[in-house]
Image (cartoon, rainbow, N blue to C red):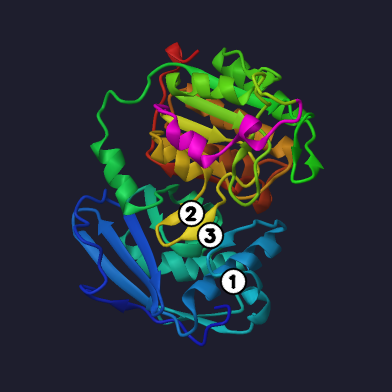
């Protein structure tokens, strides 16, 4: 294990640190918490109730996990930014050498790849408690931004080969989903937003470029859904906010701020100045939280749309804002990927959605299709996509 002298698993009751009342967790839900002592697990094992495990770690847990994720990004060939409250984490990974052995339930693995180490640390301690084909993870700290689908076991099998995976940002968000009235979310309507006009936008001294592939993406999805997308100068911030509460599906393909995932839309035509102010075009977390969103599924096809500030209750960013504003489920990306790869992923994802697959099923099948392709089988192409929130099914007969 990277930077660890050893890993041992403890099984028992963690009454001092166990969250209150976990009986409402669905089967195969794993709450993964961290503190200065190690990683703690609470799993609702099917038919047997809540089981607790603990993996003690003898260095700073947050620093260790952050360094491991940085190494993961390097190994698979991507860079994914995370703004952590502990700013020392941004350089900590450089100081940890990849020299340690891994001890996991009496098995010794020498110098594993980072994805295998993540599996050993996060999944292997609870693998015997997971008995369904769906795995719901409620992570904390750096683990909020981990590419779970690509975690690899000792037989080089990816976690998404065994489970359909989705995340929940917190236990309270699960409560909100479970307590939401059945008729709250829209059953019809789709809003597809692609390549908003940003040539008039100067953001932090930089002029943004148009995204040709983003326009192609929403046009392709529009053909699948038989829905006219909102493109270019039509995709103003005001127009998006005007329509956003009336749809069951929202898809946005646009520039996003790396640190927070906030989205650049076309400037409002009602602005008072020729030069666009941030409030004229930037869709912020505050804007989203003010909107009354009733979408069953929000797809943020924007680089780093999963990003935000990592806090104790999870990642606070644009994806979390959509859930807080009422969306039932959000599909996001952990890092930027090739435009053609995104097109291929979205095509397969929506083809499965329109044939009645749930969001987690469509995600899993799209990942599998990418892995089996000649051009996009590398982990960096298919692993960044993450489903956060509930597993939803859309009614496409009336979606347009």
**Residue 57, above or below 162:** below
**Residue 213, above or below 110:** above
Q: Which residue is more in the foreground, 238 or 98?
A: 238
Q: Which residue is more in the foreground, 293 or 119?
A: 293
Label 2 sits on a secondary structure element that is strand
The answer to whether residue 154 shows anywhere in this view is: no
Residue assigned mark 2: 315
Residue most extreme to the bottom: 5
Label 1 sits on a secondary structure element that is helix
Q: CA distance from mark 2 to mark 3?
A: 20 Å
Please report whichever mark, 2 or 3, sits nearer to the chain's N-terminal start: 3
Q: Is residue 183 magenta?
A: no
Quarter of the rendering containing residue 395: top left
Camera-near label (2 vs 3) is 2
Please report whichever mark, 3 or 1, sits nearer to the chain's N-terminal start: 1
Q: Position of residue 39 (x, y in %)?
A: 40, 72
Quarter of the rendering containing residue 213: top right
Residue most extreme to the front: 272
Residue assigned mark 1: 89
Q: Position of residue 104 (x, y in %)?
A: 44, 78
User: Is the residue marked by circle 2 packed among few (<14), some (14-19), or many (20+) residues within 10 Å?
Assistant: many
User: Is the N terminus in the top left, top right, bottom left or bottom right quadrant?
Assistant: bottom right
The answer to whether residue 397 shows anywhere in this view is: yes
Q: Which residue is more in the foreground, 336 or 244?
A: 244
Position of 294 with respect to 373 (left or right) is left
Please report whichever mark, 2 or 1, sits nearer to the chain's N-terminal start: 1
Stretch in magenta: 274-295
Q: Position of residue 178 (x, y in %)?
A: 26, 40
Residue assigned mark 3: 151
Q: Position of residue 47 (x, y in %)?
A: 19, 54
């Amino acid at each position: 294990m990277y930077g660890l002298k050893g890993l041992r698993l403890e099984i028992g009751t963690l009454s001092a640190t166990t969250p209150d009342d976990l009986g409402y967790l669905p089967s195969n839900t794993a709450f993964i918490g961290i503190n200065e002592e190690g990683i703690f697990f609470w799993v609702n094992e099917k038919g047997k109730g809540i089981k607790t495990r603990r993996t003690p770690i003898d260095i700073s847990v947050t620093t260790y996990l952050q360094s491991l994720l940085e190494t993961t990004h390097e190994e698979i060939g991507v860079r994914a930014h995370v703004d952590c409250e502990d700013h020392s984490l941004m350089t900590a990974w450089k100081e940890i050498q990849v020299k340690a052995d891994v001890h996991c339930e009496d098995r010794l693995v020498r110098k594993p790849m980072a994805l295998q180490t993540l599996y050993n640390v996060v999944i292997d301690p609870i693998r015997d408690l997971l008995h369904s084909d769906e795995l719901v993870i409620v992570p904390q700290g750096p683990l909020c931004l981990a590419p779970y689908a690509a975690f690899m076991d000792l037989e080089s099998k990816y976690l998404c080969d065994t489970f359909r995976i989705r995340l929940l940002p917190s236990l309270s968000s699960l409560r909100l989903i479970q307590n939401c009235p059945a008729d709250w979310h829209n059953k019809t309507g789709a809003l597809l937003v692609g390549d908003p006009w940003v040539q008039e936008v100067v953001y932090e001294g930089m002029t943004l470029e148009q995204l040709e592939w983003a326009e192609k993406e929403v046009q392709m999805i529009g053909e699948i859904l038989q829905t006219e997308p909102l493109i270019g100068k039509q995709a103003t911030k005001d127009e998006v906010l005007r329509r956003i509460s009336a749809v069951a599906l929202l898809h946005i393909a646009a520039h996003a701020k790396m640190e927070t995932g906030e989205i650049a839309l076309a400037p409002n035509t009602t602005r008072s100045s020729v030069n666009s102010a941030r409030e004229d075009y930037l869709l912020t977390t505050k804007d989203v939280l003010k909107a009354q969103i009733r979408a069953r599924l929000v797809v943020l096809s924007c680089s780093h749309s999963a990003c935000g500030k990592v806090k104790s209750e999870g990642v606070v960013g644009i994806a979390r804002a959509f859930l807080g504003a009422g969306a039932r489920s959000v599909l996001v990306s952990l890092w930027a990927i090739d435009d053609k790869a995104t097109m291929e992923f979205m095509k397969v994802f929506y083809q499965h959605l329109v044939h009645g697959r749930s969001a987690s099923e469509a995600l899993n099948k799209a990942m599998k299709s990418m892995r089996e392709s000649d051009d996009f089988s590398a982990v960096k192409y298919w692993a960044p996509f993450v489903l956060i929130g509930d597993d939803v099914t859309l009614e496409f007969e009336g979606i347009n």
